[in-house]
Image (cartoon, helix red, strand yellow):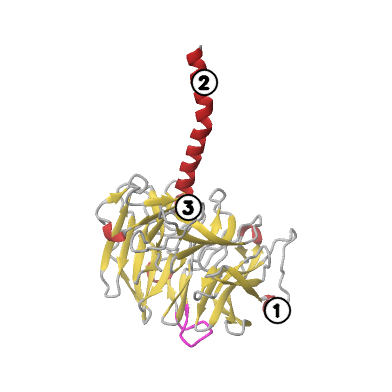
């Protein structure tokens, strides 16, 4: 009995001490969680992937690209000494700036439905975390929201829930709001009888949901007139795509320009960027989809250097070159060329997301001076990529994601340098579908 009493007493005395030691250990593990990384000599590449079985599960991996064997297929979670993983519960964004990258969606359950402007960074443990954020209103319809970063001091985003017809101005370095640009007077003058909301109060005019991009001192903002807000549905009788042109210096909304023959560009998610600027030319990719209504042929259109109007004499007509119902789903302009991700087979817009993954896509290079002479790149074909743009310019190279679910098919990244050298960079097991690659630096 005495022995049991002594043991029990020791247990009571030691328990608080053990709890204290355990709490200290947890504190030591967590102490660098939100301390930004300062040395970018290693683990300076970040790969974003989606779970092949669930596109709402995004995981980020910091790694050293120079230490990757492109012929080896990596199980990223299993090889956690080489790929340091983190899941901060955000989607992959398409903008990076020095030691940060940005995303517009959080909360992976419900199709990344919690909006916000999230600035992501690496901590001292080389894990991705939310460094700062700006609140964006959430409503029941989850419209896409685009982001544009001009430089370290000026950026723009769209927040329909708070101010549906205004574009927010913010400082990417401080993450402070700096003002708004009101597009409602311009839209009212352009279309006096416009219907602003439906019977339930849902917004029928969206600004910056599909395009928010910058070139030569002008900000270009998509203006979409919806028939039904719940489906991002554009009316059958609408035959134009619209951009508002804003002078960045004066913040004045100058005019709305239109292109006949397309209604929409990109895809209705914030992860996908349908515009690209190269050598002062802005290109826009319309894949043609119009939700439940009839779509349009997939086309690439442009605004030339020194111009603020669409070039109506030039386009890349995907159906004309590749066949009826073929689409371009991703696009980037880089190094004087245009790169497109184009379907090998007709694309059935009535199919679910699951079925569209069976559509095969190939990669092409276009010379804008010879838009009817595409060159197919020597890259394996991939699944479709409805939730991301497969192209990223990273560390002065074009990186090309090749997402494939099926075991045995190549899944990973290729790169193209400015001399035209095409190189396999990274091979992943098929359960990790690549969505975005970032290079972070001081």
Marks 1,3: beta carbons within 8 A: no
Q: Nearer the viewer, mark 3 or mark 2?
A: 2
Q: Residues within 10 Å of mark 1 (few under 14, many from 20)?
A: few
Which residue is tagged 1? Answer: 185
- The numbered mark, 1 or 3, whose residue comes first in the sequence reads 3
Q: In which quarter of the image is residue 413?
A: bottom left
Q: Position of residue 128 (x, y in %)?
A: 45, 56
| Residue closer to the observer: 319 or 9 | 9
Residue 287 is left or right of residue 205, and the answer is left
| Residue closer to the observer: 384 or 172 | 172
- Give the residue furthest to the right: 199
Which residue is tagged 2? Answer: 8
Q: How crowded is mark 3: few (under 14 residues within 10 Å), some or many (20 or more)?
A: some
Q: In the rendered structure, does residue 304 fall within the stretch colored magenta?
A: yes
At x 28%, y 56%, the residue is 68
Q: Is residue 431 above or below residue 328?
A: above
- The numbered mark, 3 or 2, whose residue comes first in the sequence reads 2
Which residue is tagged 3? Answer: 33
C-alpha span from label 3 to label 2 = 38 Å
Q: Where is residue 70 in the image (x, y as percent from the top left)?
A: 26, 57
| Residue closer to the observer: 168 or 228 | 168
Q: Is mark 3 on a helix, strand or loop?
A: loop
Quadrant of the image containing the C terminus: bottom left
| Start-end of magenta stretch | 302-314
Q: Nearer the viewer, mark 2 or mark 1?
A: 2
Confirm whether residue 262 shows in the render. Answer: no
- Give the residue furthest to the top: 1
Q: Position of residue 126 (x, y in %)?
A: 40, 55
Q: What element carries label 1?
A: helix
């Amino acid at each position: 009995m005495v022995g049991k009493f002594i043991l029990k007493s020791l247990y009571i005395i030691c328990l608080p001490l053990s709890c204290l030691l355990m709490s200290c250990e947890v504190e030591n593990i967590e102490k660098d969680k939100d301390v930004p990384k300062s040395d970018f000599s290693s683990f300076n590449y970040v790969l974003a992937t989606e779970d092949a079985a669930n596109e709402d599960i995004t995981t980020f991996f910091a790694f050293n690209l120079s230490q990757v064997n492109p012929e080896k297929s990596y199980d990223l979670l299993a090889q956690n000494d080489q790929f340091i993983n983190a899941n901060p519960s955000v989607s992959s964004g398409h903008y990076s700036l020095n030691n940060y990258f940005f995303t517009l969606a959080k909360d992976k359950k419900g199709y990344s439905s919690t909006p916000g402007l999230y600035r992501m960074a690496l901590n001292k443990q080389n894990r991705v975390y939310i460094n700062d954020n700006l609140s964006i209103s959430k409503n029941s319809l989850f419209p896409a929201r685009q982001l544009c970063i001009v430089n370290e001091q000026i950026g723009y985003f769209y927040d329909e829930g708070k101010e549906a017809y205004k574009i927010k101005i913010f400082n990417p370095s401080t993450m402070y709001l700096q003002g708004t640009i009101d597009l409602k007077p311009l839209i009212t003058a352009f279309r006096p009888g416009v219907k602003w909301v439906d019977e339930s109060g849902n917004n029928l005019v969206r600004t910056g949901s599909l395009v928010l991009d910058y070139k030569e001192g002008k900000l270009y903002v998509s203006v979409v007139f919806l028939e039904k807000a719940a489906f991002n549905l554009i009316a059958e009788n609408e035959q134009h795509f619209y951009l508002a042109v804003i002078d960045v210096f004066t913040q004045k909304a100058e005019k709305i320009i239109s292109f006949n023959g397309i209604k929409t560009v990109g895809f209705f998610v914030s992860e996908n960027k349908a515009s690209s600027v190269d050598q002062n030319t802005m290109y826009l990719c319309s894949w043609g989809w119009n939700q439940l209504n009839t779509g349009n042929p997939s086309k690439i259109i442009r605004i030339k250097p020194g111009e603020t109007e669409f070039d109506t004499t030039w386009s890349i007509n995907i159906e004309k070159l590749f066949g009826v119902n073929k689409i371009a789903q991703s696009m980037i302009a880089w190094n004087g060329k245009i790169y497109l991700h184009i379907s090998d087979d007709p694309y059935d817009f009535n199919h679910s997301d699951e079925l569209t993954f069976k559509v095969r896509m190939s990669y092409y290079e276009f010379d804008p001076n010879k838009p009817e002479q595409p060159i197919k790149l020597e890259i394996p074909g991939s699944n479709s990529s409805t939730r991301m743009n497969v192209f990223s310019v990273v560390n002065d190279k074009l990186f090309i994601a090749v997402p494939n679910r099926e075991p045995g098919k190549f899944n990973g990244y290729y790169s193209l340098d400015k001399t035209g050298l095409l190189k396999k960079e990274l091979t992943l097991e098929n359960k990790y579908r690549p969505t975005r690659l970032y290079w972070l630096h001081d």
